[in-house]
Image (cartoon, rainbow, N blue to C red):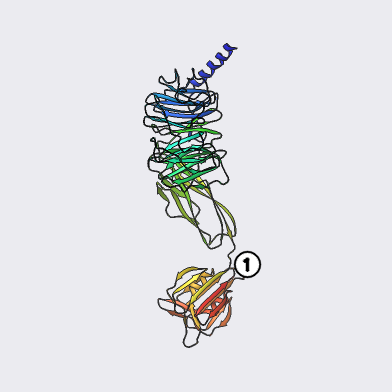
Amino acid sequence: MRKYFVSIMIIVLLILSFTTSEVRGDSKTTKVATFPYGITTIFSSGKDVFVGTKQGFFVSENYGKTFVERDRGLASLKITSVVFVKGIIFLGTSDSGLYVSKDMGKTWQSLMDKLNCPTVSSIKTNGKRIFVTSFCSGFHFSDDLGNTWEDRNGGLPTLKTTTFLETPQGRCFLGTDQYGLFYSNTLDKSCSWTKILKGRSVITLSYIGNTLLVGTNSGIFAVDIKSNNIKKIDFIGGNPYISRLIRVNGSVVAVVQNFGLFATNDGKHFVRMNCCDFENISAMYCSKDDGKLYIGNGRGELYFINLSQPFLVAENSLNLGSTQRGEKISGKISVVNLGMGDLKVFVSAPYFINFKQSSFTNPAVLPFSIDTTDLSIGSYTETVKIKSGSDTMNCFISFKVEPSSSIVLKLKVGSNIAYINSRKVSLDVTPFIDSESNRTLVPVRFISEAFGAKVEWDPKERKVSIKKGPSEHHDPVLIELWIGSKKTSVNLKSVVIDVAPKIVPPGRTVVPLRFIAETLGSTVKWNPITREITMIYNP
């Protein structure tokens, strides 16, 4: 039986040793290797790549071209974490504690006598300093590459620590299982941890700028590193399990269980990485040496994404809700550059979707507006093409155009300020009362266009034509007026009004208020005390 097992392992090692990289169908990712067990942790340093699994530890010394299993001497093969510092491998296990190797995993030394806990949950580094969290002896660190260790557990209600982060601002954060998140401004002997988030299991920590990101068993929380006012980021909804948060070229990538990868460049807006569709992600690491983002899954598959060049991540879909026909909708597509160097983006869209510009350099968002004036009533899903280099991504923008509701115009005699549904508008001609007829005259183009009509001017006949198409409550109407004449035409029928249209500076045509408003289908209210005019038009 033993010979049979050895033979099987030799075959497995041969398969791993001769694994060649292959590019996935999405052309964004490269498959590095397939291991016989689910991947639990990854670390990369130069040409050396380390992969921990549920049943063994594997090392590559040639950039992941070949791997060999190096876990002989370990009492547990359930690997939880790994780092590589100054030629020394620090390896955490779930059943036999912390190990070190100074010969690339060929031999191992147990540190159980120095850190008496079999369950190591994470290992982090900062220069020569090594940080270890565990489930039975709390948090420890070493300043001499593991020769001696100090514990810092003051103020903690539990020794079940899960993850640690030391920020550039000097504040340290420590996650626990079920007891939340704690912080301390020092790691010297006066260190005492203060709670900042309670009642949750903290799985992973990262930061972007001055914002700390906290991945928990029920979503992502954010807080200013120097503040205690922590808040949940509701970018998916519900209470998703966040298994990884890692820094990638100044941005942060999150692994959201059952939802995939998300990226953020501000710690507020997260964009799903639809370009890289992975399932069952169980480990992730970004190499600073060669710009590779390594991703491992529960099937034992190891991939990398090359981020040594600009790498575009953009929102795949936006739902802008409903708007009334004739209104403009504003929106923006969030963009993240996960790669190195300047990101140049070009956009193209249907004619009614207007971007402020067609090309952007290092954008965080792509702002746009949609003009619904010429659109029919109904639901729309339109495609915006976002191009960066040889890659093109599509963002599907959905919205609904509904019939217009009542339009309310407010004007005041002698004032050049008007309002359209509370939107302030400046007029170049103020409404006034004609001294001869005692009728209020108003600018014809402003009133007509506010109600959706089109105005045309014939200079030869000195004629104004106002055309309004049919709507839900009104038939089409054609109004024709001649400057200086009381004879007008409404739908080709002659009508006489009591004040002739006039042209007043700076060359604007004014007409009797009640005639133009009521002919277009609006009601008119006059307040003699405030001298205000209110017109209500129901399309």
Give the quadrant of the N terminus.
top right
Q: Examine the rendered structure and indicate whether residue 110 appears above or below residue 256.
A: above
- Which secondary structure lies at badge 1? loop
Mark 1, Cα crowd under 10 Å, few <14 / some 14-19 / many 20+, is: few
Q: Position of residue 396 (x, y in %)?
A: 54, 48
Q: Amino acid at mark 1?
A: Glu
Question: Residue at 39% across / 26% down in the picture?
Answer: 148
**Residue toward you, 193 or 441:** 193
**Residue toward you, 294 or 454:** 294
Task: Say whether residue 125 is left or right of residue 531.
Answer: left
Q: Position of residue 479 (x, y in %)?
A: 55, 75
Residue at the extreme bottom: 436
Q: Position of residue 90 (x, y in %)?
A: 44, 25
Please name the residue that numbered disc 1 is placed on. 472
Q: Examine the rendered structure and indicate whether residue 234 appears above or below residue 62.
A: below
Q: Examine the rendered structure and indicate whether residue 108 appears above or below residue 153.
A: above
Q: Position of residue 64 (x, y in %)?
A: 45, 25
**Residue toward you, 358 or 71:** 71
